[in-house]
Image (spheres, rainbow, N blue to C red):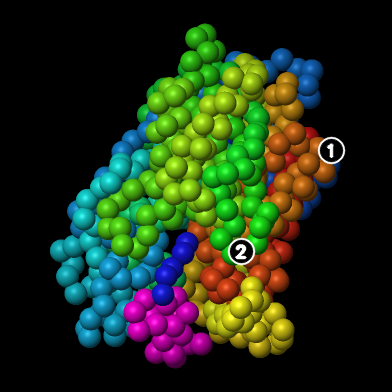
Amino acid sequence: MRLRTLPFQLSLCSLLSLAIACSGRVATQPAEPDAGDLEDAGVDAGELDAGTDAGTDAGVDAGPVLPQLRAGAAAVELIPAKGSPLAGYGAVPRRIISALSIPEQLAAADGHCIDPDPTTVATYFTPNEGTLDPLYVRAVVVDDGHTRMAILKVDAVGFSRQIRDDLVPLAQSLGIPPELLVGVATHTHSGPGAVSKFVMWELIAADCYNQVAYDVMLHTFREALLQAVANLKPARLGIGSTQEPNASQNRRDRPGIRDPEMGILKFVDATTNAPIAEVFNFAIHGTVHDQDNLKFSADVMGVAEHEIERQLGGMAMFINGAEGDVSPANGLQSGIQMANTLAAAWPQIPTEPGVALAGVFEDLTMPQLQYNVGCFPIPGSTQTICDLDPGISIQVPLNSNWGPTKGPFQAIRLSNAQGNTVLAMAPGEPETELGWEIKAFGANEGFTHTFVVSLANDHLSYFTTPAEYTRGLYEGTSTMYGPKTGVLVVQEAEKLVHALKP
């Protein structure tokens, strides 16, 4: 998420500071869930060792013959409720600034949005002015002959845990256990708002929660999931990766600190070899359209998906990587570059008719929510005052209604004759270096591929390294759980990756 400075200094930092001051508070049967530390998974990752299978029907060696894989995909257009605001920026013209609205927005710091006009979805933000390009909920469902996995993706700035929880009963009825259900957002800053009940999203970038807006989004997710299951057919799966060196850039003047790897899940029809779905994992922000845009757009990720579908057919699905400090390098052209890179790699990825799925899911109790006040940059330097004296850094405690108190972490293993791949899900925006740590750990654990999937199952804002947190730049001030947040995220991801060690 990126927030530009508002007129009269109503930036993220000043808005939060004002708010704190005013508030006075610095066809398979569904798996039966078991109780345990891993929510809904029936697996305790902490008790698993290197030789233990995890999750649902976990793991196969190269020898056994796997049942015929089936895969299905669907894309359902998301048409936000009438009058919905856009989410992703907190600056004008998206935010309504008036003598009346400023006190109301400051009062929202206690978690009580005052809606002056309940006939519209928008409250403190401007209603949308239409659509530049369609938004979608896209779904891919995989059936390994024993269980099923579903990846659901929405063109939005973040994914809501409430959506995931409300989808679990339907997923279970379709044979998809909770540990194999993934919900992700692309992180376009021109998607719909008003679907989170937490203050940090209501007040800063997404507007007050609205039940009508939420119901529209949930309905679209359900339709996409149902259609993907209905579209299941015999399939082949290939997994590979390639390099896309030109589409992204580090947005903090740190050359080389970005991940050019593009991970690819290739699903094709078992009979015709025609593409069913192109799932690609790449780290990039959806910020080509800035706060002046008031029309819905899937941004650079949508450009990539549509171009892939034009070139290859099937349904393309973008899932974001560790994009916390990475932005598009070439505007919407970055989407074309991403698509061309995938299309070039596609023929080189061999496919197999079988796969074995395993998954783990755990809610991690997070440290107390706190606001990192930030630090002044040193003119003519890339450093801040906090680089010279870390003791200057100031954190202010926040109420629990500002954000989630638990983070949903998840890992999924896909095993076939080509090897073992793990998807490591993070419920927020990790910076590049955190993603690299998780990938290196996965490689050391014996995985052929380790793909970090950000903005998954919830959005707990940014995850930074301790050094970046202390520097007090935007990513650090937007890390809401203290200086060790990034360390905790990496440790939890590695714990779950280890639980699925091949």
Q: Position of residue 15 (x, y in %)?
A: 41, 80
Q: Which residue is mark 1?
A: 51
Q: Disc 2 residue type? A: Asp
Q: Residue at x 68, y 54 (%)?
A: 256
Up the image or down, 207 lies above or below 99; here it is: above
Q: Position of residue 204 (x, y in %)?
A: 40, 71
CA gap, disc 1 and disc 2: 43 Å
Question: 10 Å neighbourhood of mark 1: few (<14), some, or many (≥20)?
Answer: few
- Which three-letter amino acid code belongs to the residue tagged 1? Gly
Q: Which residue occupies the foreground of this view, 130 or 198? A: 130
Magenta stretch encompasses residue 498? no
Q: Which label was assigned to residue 253?
A: 2
Q: Is residue 142 visible?
A: no
In magenta, the rendered stretch is: 6-27
User: Could you say where residue 477 lies in the image, as x and y percent from the top left?
Assistant: 55, 74
Q: Main secondary structure of the magenta part?
A: helix
User: In the rendered image, which quarter is residue 117 located in?
Assistant: bottom left
Position in image of residue 69 (x %, y %):
58, 19
- Tell me what residue is drawn at x 30 percent, y 58 percent: 293
| Residue at 54%, 79% in the rendered image | 371
